[in-house]
Amino acid sequence: MYADGSRQALDIERVGTIVGEACAGLQDVSESAIIDEALKNLYNGVTEHELSTSLVITARTMIEQEPNYSSAAARLLLDNLRAEGLSFLNVADSATQGDMETYYPQALKSFISRGIELELLAPNLAEYDLDMLGEALLPERDLQFSYLGLQTLYDRYFIHSDETRFELPQLFFMRVAMGLATREDD
């Protein structure tokens, strides 16, 4: 079920893609174990957000068995963050990690604009060459987080408006760098 109340069949292919990306390159982490366990907890009428949360929680419970599930849980949490942030910024409704090479440059410009509009960011940040900075973002760095590290950034540091976090990890680091460089000549 979507946020607007409309219903759609479970897109198991997208679930497989998201979980596959979350497990890519991690040893002793099983895509099928995460999917199978998460699907056990679903019910008719489950929302997209509840499904995403179920995947994160499922991977999180497996961390005790294998520490690499912390990275998988972080990557699944990233899927939630991308949906929340990109939707708020009017960039996309959702995105896979592979899509972020295209979406991060757009998201940076929209993030700076919305942040200034909401009086959450200094207006001088719009003076930077946002196209150049957007192209410098490296989406693969999002994959370096542990679950606890990413959850801490989400809970404490990412900019939000009415409890909607619209700052993504690489936008956060770029915002900090831009703020630090404000008084630099070049």
Image (cartoon, rainbow, N blue to C red):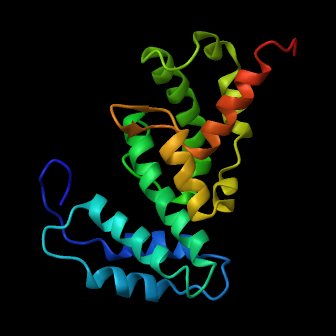
Residue at x 35%, y 37% (from the top left corner):
163
In the rendered image of this protein, does residue 66 appear above or below residue 182?
below
Q: Can residue 92 be seen in this view?
A: no
In what quadrant of the picture does the N terminus appear? bottom left
Q: Where is residue 37 in the image (x, y as percent from the top left)?
A: 36, 85
In the image, residue 161 sits, relative to residue 67, either above or below, namely: above
Q: Nearer the viewer, residue 106 or 64?
A: 64
Vertical relation: 165 (above or below) 127 = below
**Quadrant position of residue 50:** bottom left
- Residue 167 locus on image (x, y percent): 52, 38
Q: How many labels does the image show?
A: 0
Q: Position of residue 31 (x, y in %)?
A: 49, 83
Q: In what quadrant of the picture does the C terminus appear?
A: top right
Q: Nearer the viewer, residue 92 or 22?
A: 22
- Compared across the picture, whether 120 is left or right of 133 comes to left
Q: Which residue is drawn at 69% across and 30% down?
A: 176
Residue at the image position 63 percent from the left and 78 percent from the top: 68
Q: Residue at x 50, y 33 (%)?
A: 159
Residue 53, image x, y percentages:
35, 64
From this viewpoint, which residue is outermost toward the right?
185
Instruction: Report the front residue among 85 and 95.
Output: 85
Q: Quadrant of residue 134?
A: top right
Q: Is residue 118 left or right of residue 184?
A: left
Q: Can residue 19 be seen in this view?
A: yes
